[in-house]
Amino acid sequence: MEVPKKCCIFVLRNKTLKYTTMKKIILLYMLILVQVILYAQENNYIPFVEEGKVWNMRYQNDEGYLYPDYEYSYYIEGDTLVSGINCKKLYTYNENDDGLAEYKMALYETEKNVYFIPSGSTESYILYDFHIPEGTSAVVSDPIHPEWELEMRNNKNGMTKTNGISRHCLFVNRVYDSFEDFPSGWWIEGIGSELGPLNTWGFGATGNSRYFLNCEVNGETVFNRTDFIDTGEEEYYPEGTKWTEIRLDTLKYNSWYSKVGEDWVPNFETIEYRVQGECTAWDEVFKKVYSNGPEWTDSLAFLLLESRQNVEMTVIADGYALLPGVAYQFNWSVGKGIYYRDILESNSTGEYPIYLFFGVINEIKEGDFGGVRPLKYVDLDGKAPDNTYEYWDWGFTDARGGRIIQGIGITEWNDGECLFGPPNPYYALYGWTSGYKDRHYRSMLVHFERNNEVLYDVWPKREIPSGITIKDVQSANQGIIFDLQGRRVSNPKKGIYIKEGRKVLVK
């Protein structure tokens, strides 16, 4: 009797063959399932060009950092035929401009590419390419200056969900002469840039004082800027993060410690920092950082903003938060230039950024720094990348380069602060001339804790540098009082202290 073929799998006596056949069938089903999912994702693309879509924006006056000057919007309304192409019309509306709408451009899209035709023109330019595969690039045009083209590289794919709508996202970097150091930010499917519909490049079209609020379609909010974006990335400075820095007055001392008799006496002052609380500035939620030092307690030192592995900081001056300066980028890759921006330069130059470089990454290393696990780090030489505009490297010629720990920051700096000394919070508050001669410091990170875990604990060696005698360091510490943690004390209370290399008891 012949067995029907469709039943063969159940009567085979060779168990190995039976297992192999079942395995092939399972793999086939899995491949089919993957193809179905990919097909669904491909065909669930949310269009950018839709009738009734509105992007609400806010403009803030640079003279009043926390107060909006006015709000305006971009919206799509009506059809137009340009060069034989069916397009939608994009307008901008600002109630301060006599309540008149201004026609900006025609829009259309094909196969996940969004194109624009400027007002008065018949030529098309690409605004967004939403199907750039991760790790590849595409060329787009600036909507304000269409003749400007720039290569955009998709460094990471992601998803975001706002009001129950899932959208594919691309994290793109602007590439100029193979230099990928300037993040444009996220492109959100159906929305555009996270900074607004015409801010493809991440700057220029909307500027430093313009903010994207939300997007509506026919009166229904489909995307809120404040809800964006859960990328699953690590938070480097969560609530409760704390670290310790020491600073040395280089006009008085040439070493971190002095040996007096049999004792080592610290020459440095100790400053402790902690992340505690939040506040809103520049339409963003900043983290507050407080500090305790030799002459102050629980003082608000500065504000931190983390966004997609970039860390920015600012200070409160005369009741306002200054325009933030970039402190670090932790999305590393070999060949990438790591830069920072001084807060004063950020506020004085506005939309013309001056980038000061730690250096170019030649190797990403891993090492033990006294914490619970090894950490990634880079040693940078302070050189700017090749093929960059000269003005990107204006600024200070000292205190560049150095070792940066991923997720923490630089380990030494030639100023009164270490981790956030590069953007210069002190000078942002008091200016270059105020106290400049008193800033002859060298600072070092010695301890860092995150989520109750010690990640970094490295203190300077106790040694006398060449050319310095015991007599020299004894006289340098004459009359100075330290507590047992090495912090200089001006008015000691009850307890044990170190004075001129000896322990003393204050009753």
Image: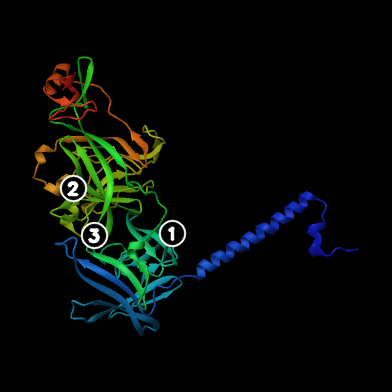
Give the alpha-carbon distance from disc 3 to disc 1, as whole Å.
Answer: 25 Å
Task: Looking at the picture, tell me which residue is in the foreground, 246 or 503.
Answer: 503
Give the alpha-carbon distance from disc 3 to disc 2, as whole Å.
Answer: 25 Å
Establish if 328 lies above or below 96: above
Give the alpha-carbon distance from disc 2 to disc 1, as whole Å.
Answer: 36 Å
Give the quadrant of the N terminus.
Answer: bottom right
Mark 2 and mark 1 in contact? Answer it, CB < 8 Å: no
Q: Residues within 10 Å of mark 1 (few under 14, many from 20)?
A: some
Give, as a three-letter code, the residue at label 1: Gly
Task: Looking at the picture, tell me which residue is in the foreground, 58 or 204.
Answer: 58
Q: Residues within 10 Å of mark 3 (few under 14, many from 20)?
A: many
Report the residue that reaches farthest toward the front: 507
Residue at horizontal 39 percent and vertical 47 percent from the top: 333
Nearer-N-terminus badge (3/1): 1
Q: Which residue is mark 2?
A: 395
Q: In terms of secondary structure, where does tag 1 sit?
A: strand
Which numbered dot is residue 158? 1
Q: Which residue is mark 3?
A: 282
Nearer-N-terminus badge (2/1): 1
Q: Nearer the viewer, mark 3 or mark 1?
A: 3
Q: Is residue 145 visible?
A: no
In the shown orientation, is residue 66 left or right of residue 77? Answer: left
